[in-house]
């Protein structure tokens, strides 16, 4: 009897299963260009802080902007619901683990206040840096005009899974092609993990795509819903869509790998897999300036009957500047991210981000353990 072929699975890969092959030519790290372009804006650093309440408040957005990167503020979180967000953040950080989900369900049940949306954006803009904010598709049509009027620079529209085609009972749901034409700022949309979904989103005219479903440290989508694709494969597939769309339209739309990166090596692998930029959450939640006080929880707030995220303790390891530029006080690769990226590009002979897309990558499940018995023993407390 011939075996059935209803489902044919293909192998997919995460960060720990691959390695970057050094190039035949090397280049001085300081000569590398790591800029990221989103619409008409150019960022010195291709590194974005995630739209999480535990990461990006007004102060963090300003600090990140002055260091050359970008932090995205969650406009459906505590910053837009409370006049005194720091008091609420402290309450979440101090809550016992057994009580924190119920507390967050209560905290996030408060309505979004449009006056606070404008106030937060204007506070960031007053500091002279780019302002980026994130909203979910369901609230975008209502909030977008307020965001535009307040002078926001980049709008992120994010949900666990976002597609160009959405079936709804509403009379006229969010249509990205209409949204792009209605606002005067670049629109970045996420999240997706497949070639076809990415390509269709790019065809709506958006300025960037976020790649990743469920890899975040505080995200529970993969456990609760069973959805997602490991980030290396997801990035490769969406990079292929970006290149196809460039051939089709002549327009280059950057993809930003979002989530699952714990250290510089993971970030570097994302760029070799095809990313133009990366979005990090837990790494930046460890900064002294982060409002989560050593904790992190996802952008997707707890549902009243199905919690979709969890508070995790990440600790505080250093300043934001130290995480980005060093000097590093840790050996786990979670600090001096910019130095790691430039060094990796140097040993691969890549002068810019598009060059590093051409670097070779190999399947290497032993890359983090080969020859590392002493290091592993120390980590486990046996050394």
Image: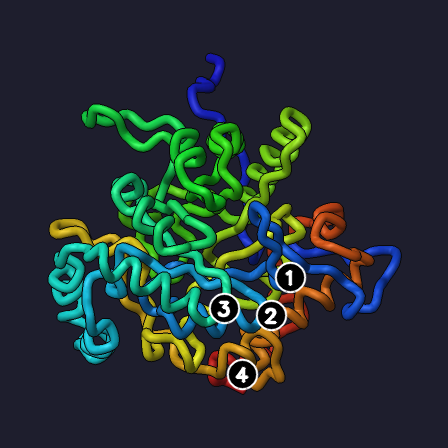
Instruction: Pick whichever of labels 4 and 1 is earlier in the sequence.
Output: 1
Drawn side of residue 201 relative to residue 267, left or right? left
Q: CA distance from mark 2 to mark 3?
A: 24 Å
Can you identify the residue that label 4 sits on?
Answer: 378
Mark carried by residue 337: 2
Q: Badges 2 and 3: C-beta atoms under 8 Å apart?
A: no
Instruction: Pick whichever of labels 1 and 2 is earlier in the sequence.
Output: 2
Q: Compared to 334, does 8 lie above or below?
A: above
Mark carried by residue 128: 3
Name the residue nearer the viewer: 38 or 102.
38
* Residue 197 image position (x, y, % from top left): 47, 31
* Residue 69 image position (x, y, % from top left): 55, 65
> What SS does tag 4 mark?
helix
Residue at x-position 38% and y-position 38%:
162
Number of numbered callouts drawn: 4
Identify the residue at the far right of this view.
Answer: 25
Residue at x-position 25% and y-position 76%:
86
Crowd around label 2: few <14 · some 14–19 · many ≥20 (10 Å): many
């Amino acid at each position: 009897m011939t075996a059935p072929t209803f489902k044919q699975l293909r192998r997919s890969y995460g960060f720990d299963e691959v390695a970057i092959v050094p190039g035949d030519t090397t280049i001085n790290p300081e000569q590398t260009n790591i800029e990221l372009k989103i619409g008409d804006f150019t960022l010195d650093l291709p590194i974005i802080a995630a739209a999480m309440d535990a990461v990006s408040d007004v102060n963090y957005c300003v600090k990140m902007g002055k260091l050359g990167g970008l932090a995205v503020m969650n406009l459906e979180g505590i910053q837009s619901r409370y006049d005194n967000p720091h008091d609420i953040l402290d309450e979440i950080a101090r809550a016992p683990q057994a009580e924190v989900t119920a507390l967050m369900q209560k905290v996030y049940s408060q309505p979004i206040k449009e006056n606070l949306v404008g106030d937060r954006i204007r506070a960031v803009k007053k500091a002279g840096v780019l302002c980026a904010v994130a909203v979910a598709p369901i609230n975008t049509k209502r909030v977008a005009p307020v965001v535009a009027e307040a002078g926001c620079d980049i709008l992120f529209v994010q949900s666990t899974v976002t597609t160009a085609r959405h079936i709804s009972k509403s009379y006229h749901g969010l249509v990205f092609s209409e949204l792009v034409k209605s606002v005067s700022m670049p629109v970045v949309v996420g999240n997706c993990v497949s070639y076809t979904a990415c390509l269709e989103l790019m065809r709506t005219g958006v300025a960037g795509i976020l790649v990743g479903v469920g890899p975040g440290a505080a995200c529970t989508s993969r456990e609760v819903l069973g959805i997602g694709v490991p980030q290396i494969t997801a990035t490769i597939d969406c990079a292929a869509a970006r290149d196809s769309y460039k051939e089709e339209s002549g327009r280059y739309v950057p993809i930003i790998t979002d989530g699952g990166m714990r250290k510089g090596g993971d970030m570097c692998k994302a760029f070799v897999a095809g990313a133009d930029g990366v979005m990090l959450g837990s790494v930046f939640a460890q900064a002294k300036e982060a409002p989560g006080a050593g904790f992190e929880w996802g952008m997707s707030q707890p549902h009243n009957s199905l919690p979709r995220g969890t508070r995790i303790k990440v600790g505080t390891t250093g300043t934001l500047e130290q995480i980005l530029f060093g000097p590093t006080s840790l050996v786990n690769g979670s600090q001096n991210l910019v130095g790691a990226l430039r060094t990796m590009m140097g040993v691969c002979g890549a002068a810019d981000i598009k060059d590093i897309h051409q670097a070779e990558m190999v399947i290497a499940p032993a890359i983090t353990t080969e020859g590392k018995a002493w290091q592993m023993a120390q980590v486990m407390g046996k050394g």
